[in-house]
């Protein structure tokens, strides 16, 4: 466990001078890779004609818009916000005293240009429908309580919602209804602004308006420049999952879906609690390389050197029992230590925290205690350097390389098209080429390829989706049958007074397995159809110009990343051990009543999850696979049509455009560019 921290920190340790210098090779690697690719595009643009240069500019912009994202999730008071502040090197930026009623996902866009240059902060409010659902049924918990017939619980929830609404109305007055569904935009980000929208306020409105909009704020987008972070990225801070109304849970699920990587923040002094099971359910359907567990607040441990290994073993055991992915990186640290270093206040840390830091550094960084400064050691012990490096590696291997591959294939197809046109000009000048393809005939051939490939993709994906729907329907029915049978057996053995519990893990595993089968099948279908489309287009080049160019091929498009079905982790009745569930049990009498009511309750609970897989997830597959094929064929139509037209330009005219020597240099330069692009395209 110590090696996980020490090995990564050794590469990213700051200089011994003060204040601490944050250097992260992993993030620098991303910036260098993007810059190197842009340099290749720049070389290509210098060789291209104006029309091709415009296409390359679009590819260049696509590359510049790379913004890898990570979502930070955890319980309230696990220290998520403090960790986010430390990660971006801005202690105190986001308020850490968060209102338990707040449901704000805060996205920090680091070094990413705002869509509106004049807007640096944007706050979105809940709309009227979201508030109506909360008020009418108490949110997710209210729905569960209503199905259970727990009238007392429903009344408590109703009173809590009314109190929350009245507090918001007291702060906002007549503006309350007017603000729902709208957003506020600002040209700056400052402490006072964040306190109004993100930070808790007292019950009575304070002079500085702290917490004025907090009750109705749904999300915040902040655009921040950080010179010490060499690339663009988005860090999302989420509300805690232990929310009475579970309103946060769905919002957090959506945020996790939007990010490729997820950091799960646990609290060292209470890892793992029953509340953390909700976090594990959320991540259980992601790949291990998309997850990092950060065990925060080791500064609160009395003996981290001996306690951390025990906590590590406990976490691994719990992850295994809950079917979480294997080989998840687990990093231990303290956001408090990191922020103390960044703010230059390590000498002001409490004695207990200082003693814990000494204890941990002597264990985890024993070989560096005599050579590093105290500031250096505490920074390494905080775990933040190791966390950033682990995160950077995942970002580089995932969204960054995938975007570069996509862009490189587009650029390479452009270069291949230019190369074909050059060959045509040479052969025509030598009188060795007779064309037979007219623009009208080319258009008809392209339309035929598009119709055939699109129809084949649709038919094959329809079959795969129908098989998936049947598979999960069968899995669902088997789960309900087994659960009901288990309930009857329990009643027969133990009677009606003994509480009974049944884990939904089996259902989630069955659904996840079916989903993985669909995922593999859909990618295989898309790869085959896209490959056939590329070969047909490559053949059409030869028929259009009546030549064969050695080594010529069309790069096959790749379907972009498809987010996992995070809703499989949504809390359902069987996950909860609360008073209304016990009340549901106590109200039933008779085996038949138990069985029938249980069947209805669990079906009502799980139907939305099943429907999400059958509708949203399948629709996402269809949209991504079809868009990839459509965009590719549209791009090829544009290239081929343009190539046919530009090939009418003679070599003499091209030499006049570029210059004689420049024309000859262009041939060699184009070959070099294609070789360099091929490295990224593979």
Image (cartoon, rainbow, N blue to C red):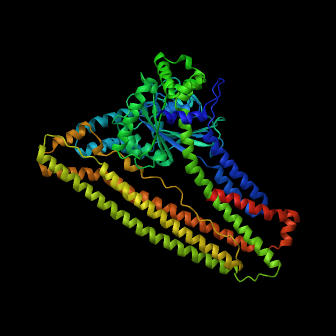
In the current view of this chain or complex, which residue is farthest to the front? 367
User: Where in the figure is residue 233, as x and y percent of width and height?
Assistant: 59, 43
Q: Residue at x 60, y 34 (%)?
A: 12
Horizontal side of 494 relative to 546 (left or right) equals left
Q: Residue at x 56, y 37 (%)?
A: 388
User: Where in the figure is residue 558, as x and y percent of width and height?
Assistant: 56, 61
Residue 116 quadrant: top right
| Image position of 362 with respect to 484: above or below | above
| Image position of 181 with respect to 340: above or below | below
User: Where in the figure is residue 196, as x and y percent of width and height?
Assistant: 52, 31
| Residue 380 or residue 457, whichever sits in front | 380
Residue 608 seen in the current view:
no
User: Where in the figure is residue 611, as x and y percent of width and height?
Assistant: 36, 57
Q: How many marks?
A: 0
Residue 275 quadrant: top left
Horizontal side of 197 relative to 672 (left or right) equals left
Residue 10 quadrant: top right
| Residue 423 or residue 260, whichever sits in front | 423
User: Quadrant of the image for the C terminus?
Assistant: bottom right
| Residue 149 or residue 426, whichever sits in front | 426
| Residue 195 or residue 650, whichever sits in front | 650
Q: Residue at x 48, y 32 (%)?
A: 2
Residue 455 seen in the current view:
yes
């Amino acid at each position: 466990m110590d090696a996980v921290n020490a090995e990564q920190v050794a590469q990213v340790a700051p200089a011994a001078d003060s204040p601490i210098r944050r250097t992260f090779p992993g993030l620098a690697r991303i910036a260098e890779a993007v810059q190197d690719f842009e340099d290749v595009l720049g070389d290509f643009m210098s060789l291209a004609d104006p029309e091709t240069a415009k296409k390359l500019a679009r590819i260049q912009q696509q590359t510049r818009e790379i913004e890898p994202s990570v979502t930070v999730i955890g319980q309230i008071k696990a220290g998520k916000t403090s960790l986010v502040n430390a990660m971006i090197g801005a202690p105190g930026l986001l308020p850490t005293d968060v209102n338990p009623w707040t449901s704000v996902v805060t996205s920090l866009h680091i070094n990413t240009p705002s869509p509106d240059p004049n807007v640096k902060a944007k706050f979105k409010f809940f709309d009227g429908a979201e508030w109506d659902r909360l008020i009418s049924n108490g949110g997710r918990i209210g729905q569960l309580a209503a199905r259970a017939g727990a009238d007392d619980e429903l009344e408590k929830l109703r009173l809590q919602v009314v109190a929350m609404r009245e507090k918001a109305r007291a702060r906002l007055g007549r503006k309350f209804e007017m603000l729902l569904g709208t957003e506020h935009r600002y040209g700056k980000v400052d402490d006072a602004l964040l306190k109004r929208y993100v930070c808790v306020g007292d019950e009575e409105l304070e002079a500085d308006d702290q917490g004025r909009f907090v009750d109705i704020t749904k999300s915040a987008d902040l655009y921040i420049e950080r010179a010490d972070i060499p690339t663009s990225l988005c860090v999302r801070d989420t509300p805690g999952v232990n929310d009475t109304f579970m309103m946060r849970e769905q919002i957090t699920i959506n945020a996790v879906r939007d990010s490729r990587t997820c950091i799960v923040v646990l609290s060292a002094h209470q890892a793992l609690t029953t509340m953390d099971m909700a976090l594990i359910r959320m991540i259980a359907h992601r790949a291990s390389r998309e997850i990092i567990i950060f065990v925060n607040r080791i500064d609160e441990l009395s003996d981290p050197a001996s306690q951390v290994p025990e906590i590590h073993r406990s976490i691994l055991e719990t992850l295994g029992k809950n079917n979480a992915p294997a080989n998840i990186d687990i990093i231990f640290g303290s956001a408090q230590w990191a922020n103390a270093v960044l703010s230059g206040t390590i000498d002001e840390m409490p004695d207990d925290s200082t003693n814990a830091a000494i204890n941990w550094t002597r264990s985890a960084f024993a070989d560096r205690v005599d050579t590093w400064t105290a500031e250096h050691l505490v920074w390494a012990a905080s775990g933040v350097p190791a966390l950033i490096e682990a995160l950077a590696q995942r970002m580089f291997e995932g969204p960054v390389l995938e975007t570069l591959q996509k862009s490189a294939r587009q650029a390479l197809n452009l270069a291949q098209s230019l190369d074909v046109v050059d060959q045509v000009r040479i052969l025509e000048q030598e009188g060795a080429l007779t064309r037979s393809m007219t623009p009208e005939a080319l258009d008809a051939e392209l339309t035929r390829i598009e119709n055939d490939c699109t129809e084949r993709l649709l038919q094959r994906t329809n079959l795969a989706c129908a098989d998936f729907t049947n598979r999960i329907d069968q899995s669902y029915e088997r789960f309900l049958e087994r659960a009901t049978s288990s309930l009857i057996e329990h009643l027969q053995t133990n009677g009606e007074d003994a509480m009974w519990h049944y884990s939904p893990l089996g259902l989630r595993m069955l659904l996840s397995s079916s989903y993985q089968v669909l995922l593999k099948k859909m990618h295989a279908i898309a790869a085959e159809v896209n490959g056939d489309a590329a070969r047909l287009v490559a053949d059409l080049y030869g028929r259009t110009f009546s030549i064969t160019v050695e080594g010529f091929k069309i790069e096959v498009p790749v379907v972009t990343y498809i987010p996992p079905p995070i809703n499989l982790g949504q809390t359902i009745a069987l996950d909860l051990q609360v008073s209304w569930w016990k009340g549901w049990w106590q109200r039933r009498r008779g085996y038949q009543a138990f069985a029938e009511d249980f069947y209805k309750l669990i079906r009502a609970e799980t139907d939305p999850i099943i429907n999400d897989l059958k509708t949203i997830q399948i629709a996402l597959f269809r949209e991504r696979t079809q868009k990839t094929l459509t965009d590719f064929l549209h791009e090829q139509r544009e290239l081929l049509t343009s190539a046919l037209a530009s090939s009418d330009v003679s070599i003499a005219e091209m030499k006049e455009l570029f210059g004689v020597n420049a024309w000859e240099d262009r041939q060699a330069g184009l070959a070099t560019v294609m070789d360099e692009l091929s490295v990224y395209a593979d």
